[in-house]
Image (cartoon, rainbow, N blue to C red):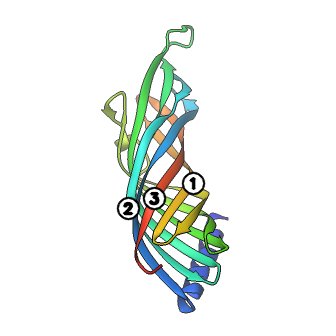
Amino acid sequence: MKHLFLTILACCAISMAAQAQIFTAGIKAGVSSSSVDVENVKNNLTQFKESDNITGYHAGAFLRLAAGNLFVQPEGLFTYTGGKVEYSNDPNTTDLHVEKFKFTRLDVPLLLGYKVFNVVHVNAGPVASVLLNGKFEGDKIDQYMNNAEWGWQAGLGVDVGNLVADLRYQALNSGYEDAVNGNYDIKNGQIMLSLGLKIIGK
């Protein structure tokens, strides 16, 4: 299903590029509130519980190909994200520790959007994510995680002149595999607020 959606989105992008009325390129940056949920823990005495969000950030560039009210928008974003978890190595104790997962990623969303009244827009689509660095309790863990993952984004925004503001939610699942410390799934969710500047086009 994921590959079918990507194929349809790619076909839309090619078709819109052929008849594009507006080509826009710009830069963007913003902040996020992100959390981590650890699930399906196997071969590990550590018990995880979601604790709290952390503040992250992102910065990068975007392109937009528009035909009428429809547009396709690929982006490239460097992101810092993660979340706090409570954990214990003994399931029989209530003595819990709070630590942070921290991730640095290169995210590449490919969004399909629709503009309303030429000001408000909604968009959604898949995100390819490459893990650049991962830490837990200050220790590097990226060698135990998948290098690349797929997720999704959805949200809305406004265009005012050369400025673009977006509010989105991003969800991404990663796998952790360590022969000593066990395996588990890491779900990382972000609420992302960003401001962009159109450098080419309007």
- In this orientation, which residue lies closer to the viewer: 200 or 15? 200
Describe residue 139's horizontal placement relative to residue 7 as left or right: left
The residue at which mark 1 appears reads as 168
Q: CA distance from mark 3 to mark 2?
A: 11 Å
The residue at which mark 2 appears reads as 60
- In this orientation, which residue lies closer to the viewer: 103 or 91? 103
Q: Residue furthest front?
A: 161
Residue type at mark 1? Arg
Taking the spot 64% from the left edge, 84% from the top edge, the residue there is 68
Tell me the crowding category of disc 2: few under 14, some 14 to 19, or many 20 or more residues within 10 angstroms, Cα based.
some
The residue at which mark 3 appears reads as 195
The image shows residue 33 at horizontal and vertical percentages of 50, 41
Residue type at mark 3? Leu
Q: Which mark is residue 48?
A: none
**In the rendered view, would you say 175 is above or below 71?**
above
- In this orientation, which residue lies closer to the viewer: 173 or 16? 16
Question: What is the quadrant of residue 42 in the picture?
Answer: top right
Mark closest to the chain's N terminus, 1 or 2? 2
